[in-house]
Image: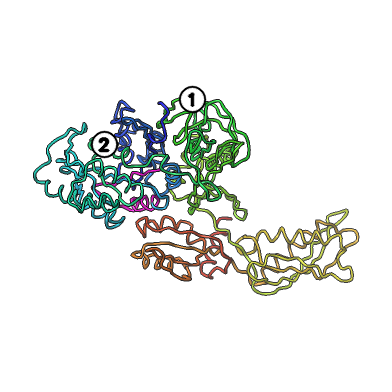
Amino acid sequence: MAQSGLESIRNVALLSHSGAGKTSLSEAALFTAGAIGRLGRVDDGTTTSDYDPDEVRRQISINLTLLPCNWQDTRLNLIDTPGYADFAGEVMAAIRVVEGALIVVSAAAGVEVGTEQAWAYCQEAGLAGLIFVNKMDRENADFKRTVSELQSMLGPKCLPLQLPIGAHNDFQGVIDLLSGKAYTGSQAEEAAIPSSLEDEVSSLREKLVEAIAELDDDLLEKYLGGDELSLEELSNGLRRAVLEGKVVPILAGSALKAVGINLLLEAICRYLPSPSDREAAIVGGAAVKPSHQAPLAALVFKTTADPYVGKLTYFRVYSGVITSNSQVWNVTRNGAERIGQLFLLRGKSQEPVAQVGAGDIGAVAKLALTSTGDTLGSQDKLLKLAPIEFPEPIFGEAVHPKTKADLDKLGTALSRLAEEDPTLKVRREADTGETILSGLGETQLEAAAEKMVRKFGVGVELKTPKVPYKETITAAAKAEYKHKKQSGGHGQYGQVFLELEPLPRGGGSEFVKRIVGGAIPKNYIPAVEKGVNEAARQGVLAGYPVVDIKTTLYDGSFHPVDSSDICFKIAGAGALKKGLSLGQPVLLEPIMNIRVTVPKDFTGDVIGDLNTKRAQVQGMNPENGVNVIDARVPMDEVLRYAIDLKSLTQGRGRYTTEFSHYEEVPAHIAQKLISQKQTEKV
């Protein structure tokens, strides 16, 4: 595929709610543009975009996919993205490297939560956009209702550029409102406008023309003067309005029947911005103008482990040119990076190219230093592009290897997964000994586990993480323990007196020595402390670590021959266990600060649900049309809150959590936990 000038490139992200038909639409676009010779189907697992085995099996997009094609004289870099909320990281990566967005809406389902989210992403990123009402051939397809929902939920600037001819089995084609021409069939053959639609066409065209004229003083003067605006004037005016975000044109069609696809491709070329229309943000608040002659600045927006070529790095060039078999400077890592053969990707197919210029998107294999979010540039003039802002993980599960062989390879596989997907985080929970994999939702983690088996040969089970409970005492106590053993030869002897006091929450643990008169020789005191610390790892109630206590060694006795370090270590541990039992021990549980952001309609349900989870609501504040609820809630109650909140709010709610403090577990719950632990030991 030939390299293109900046003005003749369109980088476009396809966004939608899951199931609106992005993947089928991208397939129809590739087929219509002649980039592929056969139209694949999602149901058959034969689409160019969803080639990953997990995607084929689940019949949903999991990864972003590059789908370049040519339409007339324009190079289109389409990026198909997942519609499922768990894979929002892929959407954010795609949005970061495009100038335009195509939001796909199902004519049967209308505006869904994913549509609203896609719109919010576009608004936040300042992307110009088009809306494509897909599935006009489906039962219950209703263009008018969908347009009304779009205007109600996304704003009045969403205006029809096309009107469909018929719907469901009668769907034939579309009418272009600017040109006033009708086009039918997959070949977009010109046809007469049905007489039944003439009045509607006239009315919608008038609204569109008025909206375009209002944004340009010269056009407005001509329009108010009663002069007819030419098609070229309207087209140019609409492009300016789209680029400025003041109008979002709505188109219609059917991806499965490839009807309206030609006109959609033309609209993308005509109305969406090229790379030359937008500067790239660099760290420090400045911007870089796209140019082939400028120093190199390329952003890495995805990294994947390809089973055939190894690590594959996707990048977008903002300025300069990157060539095959060259060397570049990784500005982020401050190191040189060797570039091998460059590729243009279309799904899983790779086309070798000599270079990738400004405005274009490419890939390269086997980079050593580079990770997602890094800037590749020139050492002579360092330009660091603003990195991609990925959502923070909110849902975690414990990863348990199935076999000893899986355990040996687990660490490497998890680090490779996290490298591929920056929304996945891996950590070791010291208190429970579990490895926790965190992401955006259950489906994402299930897909990650399947990928570990397929790509890295590591079998794992995902389980709800254990809660890192602690134990402490609520009353001061004194305890004595004597370790005495005689079995021929040297005996064993050590006696320890301890005083235990509770400390404030979060006070940690202290060991104090208050020995007088040499009751215990100084050289044995560290052994007592070691015994106390080791015994504190397992409390007397349920075997959880002991915290927030002050242990004072105040007396003891020794034998000049039979005493040793080990004797006093055993005595220290025994005395602590006795003291814990006498100090009215209790269980402590971690309390989390949780911030839940929900639409106003769902606020009551969410607060009611939080109350059932033993939450203490701290406050609620309205913010940009939503309510933000702040609460404190036990960790045990919100380990699977991502699933609960999605169900409660139809996917419209989101939340963040952070550790706050430890608090005493209510007696009835503590008793259950203790019983469970005792059962596990049996």
**As displayed, is residue 508 above or below residue 266?**
below
Q: Please, is residue 440 above or below residue 259 in the view?
A: below
Crowd rating for badge 2 (residues with CA inside 10 Å; few <14, some 14–19, many 20+): many
Which residue appears at 29% of the width and 34% of the height? Answer: 28
- Reading the image, the residue beneath label 1 is 354
**Label 1 environment density (alpha carbons within 10 Å; few <14, some 14–19, many ≥20):** few
Q: Is residue 635 left or right of residue 565?
A: left
Corner quadrant of residue 380 = top right
Colour mapping: rainbow
Quarter holding the N terminus?
top left
Image location (x, y in percent) of residue 617: 46, 70
Which residue ends up furthest to the bottom in the rendered image?
475
Asked whether 113 falls inside the magenta stretch, the response is: yes
The image's mark for residue 261 is 2
Q: Is residue 478 above or below residue 521?
A: below
Name the element at disc 2: helix
Please, what is the three-letter code of the amino acid marked with disc 2?
Answer: Ile
Q: Is residue 144 above or below residue 265?
A: below
Label 2, label 1: how many angstroms apart (C-alpha)? 31 Å
Residue 599: image location, x then y, percent: 36, 62
* Residue type, label 1: Ala
What are the residue bounds of the magenta stretch?
99-122
Question: Considering depth in this image, is 563 or 168 the residue closer to the camera?
Answer: 168
